Amino acid sequence: MQLHISPSLRHVTVFPSKGFKEFIKVKIASRRLSYRMLFYFLLFFTFLLRFVFVLTAVDGIDGENKCSTIGCLGKKLGPRILGRRSESTVPEVIYQTLDEPLGKHELQGRFDIPQTLEEFMIEMKKGGHDAKTFAVKLREMVTLMEERTRMAKIQEYLYRHVASSSIPKQLHCLSLSLANEHTNNAAARLQLPSAELVPALVDNSYFHFVLASDNVLAASVVATSLVRNFLRPQKVVLHIITDRKTYYPMQAWFSLHSLSPAIIEVKALHHFDWFTKGKVPVLEAMEKDQKVRSQFRGGSSAIVANTTEKPKVIAAKLQALSPKYNSVMNHIRIHLPELFPSLNKVVFLDDDIVVQTDLSPLWDIEMNGKVNGAVETCTGEDKFVMSKKLKSYLNFSHPLISKNFNPNECAWAYGMNIFDLEAWRKTNISNIYHYWVEQNIKSDLSLWQLGTLPPGLIAFHGYVHVIDPFWHMLGLGYQENTSFVDAESAGVVHYNGRAKPWLEIAFPQLRKLWTKYVDFSDKFIKSCHIRAS
C-alpha cells in the first residue's frame, strides 16, 4: 500500500499494493480556520471540561470503592464502545495453576517450599519468575500451611481429650486423703443426714435436688453454690448419688464440711433397693455399648490417624470416647422415678455446673403436664452451643431416625432440669430410652455418637416444658469467648465441654465463677496442691 499526499495538503491518495489499480482519494478541508469555527470549538471544549469535572466530583463523593451511576456507566461502556472487554488484571495461568489438584505426597520431603510469607516474598523478588512459577509456589506454600494447621488442630483436640478423660493427680490425691480420713477419723463417718433429719428426705414440702457424681471437688462446688445462694437453705435437701469407690471420700468430705442448715444425703448406687433387684437396663446397655465402642471405634489413635475427616468431626468422635459417656453417673437420671419413689418433683444438677441464684422459683413453674423442664438450645446466635436442633445430635441419614423425627425440631439441654416425677410415672419414658439405646447398639452406634442426650431427646420427645434461658447458660467448657459478664448474670452456668473448671485446660477468666466456691485454705485442698490458677 502506498500513500501520496499532495503539496497543498488538500488531497491524500492511497494506492493498494500487489498490482491493483484502484485507488482511494480523500479530500482534506481547507487549512484556513475561521473565527466562527474557533468559537464553536472553544464552546464545545468548555462543555466537555464541565462534564468531566462533574463525573470526577461525583465519583470522589461516592468514595474510593464506589462510583456514581453515570460514572459507573461510563466505566462499563467505555471499553465496550472501544471494542475492548473488561478483564481481570490477574493472568489466567495463575487461576489455572491454583485450580490444579495437588497430590497428597507431593509435598513430603520438600525443603524448597517457603515456610512463611516473608520467605515467599523474598524468593519472588529475586526475579526470574513468571506468573506460573508464582502460582505454583503460592499453592505449595498455602497447601503446606493448611495441612500443618489441620494437624495442629487435631493434636489440640487429642490433648484436650486426654486431659479431660484422665483423673488429675490433685483430684486423685483428694479422694485418697478423704478415704484415709474416713478410716481414721470418726467425725468423717457421720451418718448423712443425721437420724432426726431423715424424714425430710421424703418430705415434698422441701426443695429436693439430685446430684450424681464421682468427683468430690466438683460435687462440693455444686452443693456449696446451691446452698449459699438459696434464700431458705433450711428447706434444701440435696441427694448426692455416687459409685462404690467414691462413696467413702464423698461421705468424709460432707461430714467434715457441713452445709447446715441444708440437708445433705450421700448414697452409693448399691444402697438403693431398686438398683440391687434383678437386672438393671441401664447397666446392661452400658456393658453392650462399651463392647461395641471398642470394636467399631478403634480408640483415639485410629480416630486421629484418619487423614480424610475434618478436625471438628475427629473432635466429636474423640468426645464420644470420653469415660463420661460410659459412666453410670451419666445414665442414672433416667431412673429418677424409681430411685425416689416418694418424691413428686426434683431438680437434677450435673456436677460441672455452678449455681448463682436462688433456685426456689423453679418449683413455681407450671409444667402443664410435661415431665422435663429444660432450656432450649436452638434459639441463640452461637452456632456451637445454642443453635442445636435434633439434626445436630441424631443421624438423619439412618431410616430409623428420619422416619420418626423432624430434623429441624429444637433440642434442649441436660445439666439443670426440673423433673415432675408424678407426671413421669404416668409415661413410658424410661422404657423408650432403653429401647432406643438398644437400637443404637444393634445399629453399630450409627444412630448417634454422644452418650445420654440423644436418647434423652428421643425419650422425652413431647414431654419437655421450655423454661427461660436465664436458668441455664451453657458452653463454658467449649468457648473461651463466652462473655464473663453474661455468664456472671446467669442463674446457673454449665461447664459442658472438655475445659472443665477443675482441669488446667479450663478457660482462666471463666474458671473464676467456679473457684469462688472452693476454699483453697482447706487442709485437704492445700495438701493436694489444688490451686486457684
Image (tube, helix red, strand yellow):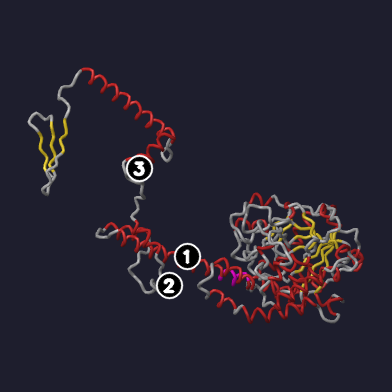
Determine contact: label 3, label 1, CB under 8 Å. Answer: no
Q: Is residue 57 left or right of residue 230?
A: left
Mark 2 burial class by Cα count in 10 Å: few <14, some 14-19, many 20+: few
Quarter of the picture holding the C terminus = bottom right
* Image x and y of residue 437, in percent: 74, 74
Q: Amino acid at mark 3?
A: Arg
Which span of residues is magenta-colored? 158-164
Judge whether 151 appears above or below 361 on screen: below
Secondary structure found at label 2? loop
The mark closer to the camera, 3 or 1, is 3
Q: Residue at x 36, y 62 (%)?
A: 97
Judge whether 120 appears above or below 87 on screen: below
Q: Which mark is residue 149?
A: 1
Q: Residue furthest top?
A: 35
Residue 258: quarter of image: bottom right
Give whichever of discs 3 and 1 has the lower sequence position. Answer: 3
Secondary structure found at label 1? helix
Secondary structure found at label 3? helix
Q: CA distance from mark 2 to mark 1?
A: 15 Å
Q: CA distance from mark 3 to mark 2?
A: 44 Å
Along the line of sight, the residue nearer the viewer: 212 or 196: 212
Q: CA distance from mark 3 to mark 1?
A: 45 Å
* Image x and y of residue 189, in percent: 81, 73
Dot 2 corresponds to which residue?
A: 104
Dot 3 corresponds to which residue?
A: 80
